[in-house]
Image (tube, helix red, strand yellow):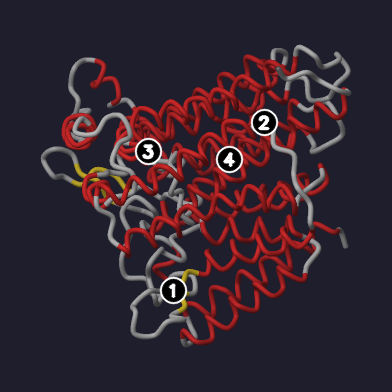
């Protein structure tokens, strides 16, 4: 019996118990079981396993574990009765990971140290400036809670210190992607999520599906089975990186399958920003891969042929056509229709509202004040970031992003031709481009208060992955001058 088989039996067994205790048993049972998971994580040496498990809990498939739902979400704890303040399991996991990492005494090397220090100093100044704009005690506590998940970057780097850890993490994640795609196919055929069968009687907008959206006339046009999108994005990153990595790693055909499935999982959601991001990431991946272009096209044709049985279904084919048709509405924006044919309110309504408030305090924004909370809008990521941190803070974020994108190119100039990371490092700026397109078109990702939902957790895995493999390339090549 292979190690992966044993791990997946353990993984799926624990995940099944999470579902059973959440949906079929009293809340107290779920709360106790999730605390037991924290103990198991703290005592385990297989940190890659538990980080994959955590990611699949916060970015679950099939409409499971909706956020802020006491009955059907991940365990919530009321440690201070009478206050109405609940503690999320996600927070407890992040604190457990931080405590476990601190106990090792290890200080990870950070290639992004300088921009992170600048962002950290500005964060402190902005936090205190927020009191001048008016920040209630509850807003202050909420802000602190939502900033703490940045500690995951430190925890992941300390607790997943080797190439083997990341390899094992991704071999689990790739299988989870397959499970997620299976739930999407289920939703397309049955027009409901698997979670509905477990008792959830609503479909939360933006997070899970299938979800009906309407055109300007209010007519329902399509079901959107959104399932584990950030598991898909992180899987895509791993598959691209390891495909271009010239050392011993995953089977290339297996990586092609993962890239295909990750792309399929986003296409069926009809989420325009994500579809555009994936399209550009894959095009750039093929360009830097050079000789893989022909092979990639051949494999895609084979996968489409292999999927033809499913595509024969009028429901599936109709769904894919609708997804592509919705993505094509972006063209209307270039023609001057800011609503994309009545399907998008971002540029015409949301953006002007947020920017009007930003112009009242453009230099440092509104910080974490109550004014910021009342006027921010997750649908317009860059505008909301400007509202939060102002021009100064936005320039610091640009410096951070610039470092992430440029550093792999700078390092490659010093790498020997035999360095296995020569091409694979270029996947890092490609994936960042995907994050930025999603942030700019679908929903805000970049911010100080990243929160403990899937988008914030996903970013920490991306930063940690980029940091680890940039350092791995440097160490393999000898000393590299980064200045």
Determine crowd level at label 3: few under 14, some 14-19, many 20+ residues with C-alpha closer than 10 A. many
Q: Residues within 10 Å of mark 1 (few under 14, many from 20)?
A: some
Task: Say above or below: 483 vs 136.
Answer: above
Q: Earlier in the sequence, mark 2 or mark 1?
A: 1
The disc placed on residue 198 is 1
Mark 3 or 2, nearer chain start: 2
**Reading the chain from its start, which is encountered first: label 4 or label 3?**
4
Which quadrant would the C terminus be assigned to in this image? top right
Mark 2, residue position = 240
The local secondary structure at tag 4 comes to: helix
- Residue shown at 77% from the left, 20% from the top: 422
Asked if the residue under mark 1 is in contact with the one under mark 2, i.e. CB atoms within 8 Å, the reply is no
Rendered position, 361 above or below 221 = above
Q: Earlier in the sequence, mark 2 or mark 4?
A: 2
Question: SS of the residue at dot 1?
Answer: helix
Percent x, y for residue 311?
Answer: 48, 39
Residue 412's spot in the image, x, y percent? Answer: 75, 16
Location of residue 226 in the rendering, given as x and y in whole percent from the top left corner: 42, 49
Q: Determine the image quadrant of residue 476.
A: top right
Q: Are marks 4 and 1 in contact (CB under 8 Å)?
A: no
Foreground residue among 453 and 10: 453
Is 217 positioned to the left or the right of 328 in the image?
left
Label 2 – label 4 distance at C-alpha: 13 Å
Residue wearing tag 4: 261
Residue at (26% x, 46% y) in the render: 372
Compared with 424, 265 (above or below) is below
Residue linked to disc 3: 271
For discs 3 and 1, the disc positioned in front in the rendered view: 3
Q: Residue at x 66, y 56 (%)?
A: 52
- SS state under label 2: helix
Q: Are marks 3 and 1 in contact (CB under 8 Å)?
A: no
């Amino acid at each position: 019996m292979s190690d992966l088989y044993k791990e997946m039996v353990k993984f799926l067994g624990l995940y099944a118990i999470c579902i059973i205790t959440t949906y079929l048993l009293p809340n107290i049972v779920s709360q106790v079981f999730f605390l037991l998971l924290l103990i198991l994580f703290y005592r385990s040496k297989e940190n890659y396993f538990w980080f994959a498990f955590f990611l699949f809990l916060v970015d679950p498939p099939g409409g499971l574990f909706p956020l802020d739902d006491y009955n059907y979400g991940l365990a919530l704890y009321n440690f201070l009765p009478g206050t109405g303040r609940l503690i999320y399991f996600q927070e407890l996991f992040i604190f457990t990971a931080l405590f476990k990492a601190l106990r090792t005494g290890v200080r990870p090397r950070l290639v992004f140290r300088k921009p992170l220090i600048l962002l950290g100093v500005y964060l402190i100044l902005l936090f205190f400036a927020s009191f001048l704009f008016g920040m209630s005690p509850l807003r202050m506590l909420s802000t602190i809670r939502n900033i703490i998940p940045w500690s995951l970057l430190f925890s992941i780097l300390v607790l997943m210190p080797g190439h083997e850890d990341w390899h094992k993490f991704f071999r689990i994640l790739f299988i989870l992607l397959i499970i997620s795609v299976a739930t999407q196919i289920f939703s397309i055929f049955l027009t409901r999520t698997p979670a509905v069968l477990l008792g959830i009687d609503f479909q939360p907008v933006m997070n899970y599906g299938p979800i009906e959206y309407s055109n300007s006339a209010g007519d329902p046009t399509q079901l959107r089975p959104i399932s584990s999108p950030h598991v898909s994005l992180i899987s895509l990153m791993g598959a691209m990186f390891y495909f271009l990595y010239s050392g011993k790693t995953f089977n290339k055909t297996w990586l092609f399958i993962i890239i295909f499935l990750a792309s399929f999982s986003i296409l069926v959601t009809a989420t325009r920003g994500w579809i555009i991001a994936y399209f550009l990431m894959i095009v750039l991946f093929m360009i830097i891969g050079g000789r893989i272009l022909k092979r990639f096209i051949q494999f895609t044709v084979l996968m489409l042929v292999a999927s033809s049985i499913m595509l024969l279904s009028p429901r599936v084919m109709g769904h894919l056509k609708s997804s592509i048709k919705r993505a094509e509405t972006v063209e209307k924006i270039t023609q001057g229709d800011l609503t994309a044919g009545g399907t998008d309110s971002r540029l015409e309504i949301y953006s002007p509202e947020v920017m009007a408030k930003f112009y009242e305090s453009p230099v440092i924004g509104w910080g974490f004040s109550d004014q910021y909370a009342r006027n921010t809008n997750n649908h317009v990521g860059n505008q909301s970031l400007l509202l939060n941190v102002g021009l100064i803070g936005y320039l610091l974020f640009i410096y951070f992003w610039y470092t992430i994108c440029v550093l792999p190119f700078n390092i490659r100039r010093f790498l020997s031709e035999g360095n296995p990371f020569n091409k694979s490092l270029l996947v890092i700026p490609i994936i960042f481009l995907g994050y930025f397109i999603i942030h700019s078109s679908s929903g805000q990702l970049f911010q100080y208060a990243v929160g403990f939902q899937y988008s914030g957790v996903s970013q920490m895995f991306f930063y940690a992955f980029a940091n680890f493999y940039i350092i791995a390339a440097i160490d393999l090549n000898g000393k590299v001058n980064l200045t």
